[in-house]
Amino acid sequence: MQRPGTFDRGDGVALAVSARPGSGPALIFVPGYASDMTGAKADAVDGWAAAHGRACTRFDYSGCGASGGAFTDGTIGRWLADSEAVLAQHPGPVVLVGSSMGGWIALLLALAHAERIAGLVLIAPAPDFTQWGLADTLTSDERASLLRSGRFERPSPYAPQPTVYTRALIEDGAARLLLGRPLPYAGPVRILHGQADPDVPWRLSLDLAERLASSDVRLTLVKDGDHRLSRPSDLALLADALASL
């Protein structure tokens, strides 16, 4: 049975966590931008863990879902600290399952805590998206909004309300870029990416696979897959990736 609850990340902000007991290595689901632990992929990971007796933890970043804090205070560094606080709750090895931005954060965790990370499953990973997806594509109106208020909005295909991005997010992300250098993580890595993904170019996963030091990297491309990769057939591929680790 899952154990929903919260814990203080160390500064008075309560993080919402749902932990399923079981054997290890434990699975930790690392969400995407403006996402939470209730999505189809997070549910699929938890369901696979339940079926196989594996420990699994899902959580919401500060400012997201059921966690405390303000979303606009969020940066890659802040959400990385949230993820490290969750990782610290697990004494043994873990497998990180990172979706989109969560793939970037999972990679940062793996580089900083390689001895703890038994494997990575990355779903449409978006390392450095604050650069190639935001800073490099700002319109003149967005730049003006950043200068005026420190934030701008873009329409979201996944929600009725627009998505908010902040100057702090972009500036913090610039200090944590991964692409453009070797990535000395040597553990097993499984990457899933849709070739019809409109948000994260699938060739970015090819670049990522080449930069990882691991000799056990498998990249699965789904020709008609979108960014979410949440169809039953996509979730079956996710289950296969988990089983391979």
Image (spheres, rainbow, N blue to C red):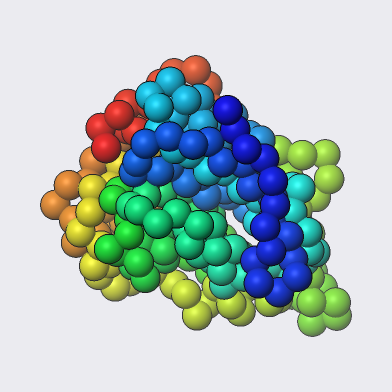
Report the residue at 20% width, 59% height from top: 186
Seen from the viewer's position, the closer of residues 170 and 144 is 170
Q: Residue at x 24, y 41 (%)?
A: 218
- Residue at the farthest left position: 215
Front position in the image: 201 or 71: 71
Image quadrant in which the C terminus is located = top left
Question: In which quadrant of the rendered view does residue 127 lie?
Answer: bottom left
In the rendered image, the vertical position of residue 63 relative to residue 41, given as above or below: below
Whether residue 41 is visible, yes or no, is: no
Estimate the x, y position of residue 131 in percent, counting from the top left. 53, 69
* Residue at figure coordinates x 66%, y 35% from the top left: 38
Q: Is residue 80 visible?
A: yes
The spot of residue 179 in percent (x, y) is: 36, 67
Q: How far across and down, in percent of the image, does residue 65 sit?
A: 74, 47
**Left or right of 110 in this view: 60:** right
As drawn, is 3 to the left or to the right of 236?
right
Position above or below: 182 against 66: below
Q: Indicate whether 204 appears above or below 150.
A: above
Residue at image location 45% in from the left, 54% down from the top: 90
